[in-house]
Amino acid sequence: MKCILCQEYCIQPLNIMDYLLIRKEQAICCQKCKNNFERVNPNFSCVRCQKKGKEKICSDCKKWEEKGFIINHKALYYYNESMKDYFKKYKFNGDYLLKTVFVNDLKKAIKPFSNYQIITVPISQLTFEKRQFNQMQVILEECNIPFLIPFIKVEGNVQSKKTKIERLNNKNSYRLQNEMKNKITKNILIIDDIYTTGATIVALIKI
């Protein structure tokens, strides 16, 4: 197997059950690269947003609570240097094939939410024209997970270009498409790629 991240060749280990059931999903990145991504440890994370830190509830979540919002966010990995490099290649350099790296992780994470309607976050038309794909949409498609994109991103500065204060005070970033109003019928699970301050989640909840 050739690792999609480091481009090195490596051997994927199989156990006896993999041979008997022929069920092994082909890995697309080597264990060394995967180990560079730091999994979330609930014991050292905010109980609401899972941001890494010693505080039980982080300062951002406390600010949202003051405004009447209780964040309930689950993360798979911390945003460390390896993750930052991954998203730079995937989103900003347009390495489309990197959509497969976290497919297996996402499938497992979503299993407990089978009764929820999956919603992912839109990108602006300008961003789509530059990138040619919505980063979360193609990952969910790769997972064969049904989802909706009922919101439209209002044109403006992208989140990655904003300061933390600008993100926390972000208003009217999205609007609900009229034809989608009657399609949201269940409890919803919002899936996005990177959690920073919680501004995106709150903006969608307000709608």
Image (spheres, rainbow, N blue to C red):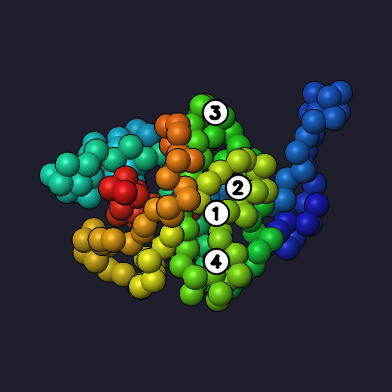
Q: Are marks 2 and 3 in contact (CB under 8 Å)?
A: no
For label 3, the residue is 114
Q: Is residue 86 in sight in this rendering? A: no
Under mark 1, the amino acid is Met
Q: Secondary structure at mark 1?
A: helix
Under mark 4, the amino acid is Lys
Q: CA distance from mark 4 to mark 3?
A: 28 Å
Q: Looking at this view, is 147 or 3 the one in front?
A: 147
Above or below, 98 relative to 52: below
Q: Looking at this view, is 175 or 141 the one in front?
A: 175
Q: CA distance from mark 2 to mark 3?
A: 14 Å
> Dot 4, how many residues are within 10 Å of its Cα: few (below 14), some (14-19), or many (20+)?
some
**Residue 136's disc number:** 1
* First along the sequence among labels 1 and 3: 3
Q: Looking at this view, is 12 or 51 the one in front?
A: 51
Q: CA distance from mark 1 to mark 4?
A: 10 Å
Q: Secondary structure at mark 4?
A: helix
Q: Is residue 141 in sight in this rendering? A: yes
Q: CA distance from mark 2 to mark 1?
A: 6 Å
The residue under the point 66% across, 52% down is 100
* First along the sequence among labels 2 and 3: 3
Nearer the observer, disc 4 or disc 3?
A: 3
Q: Position of residue 44 (x, y in %)?
A: 33, 38
> Dot 2, how many residues are within 10 Å of its Cα: few (below 14), some (14-19), or many (20+)?
many
The residue under the point 20% across, 46% down is 64
For label 4, the residue is 91
For label 2, the residue is 140
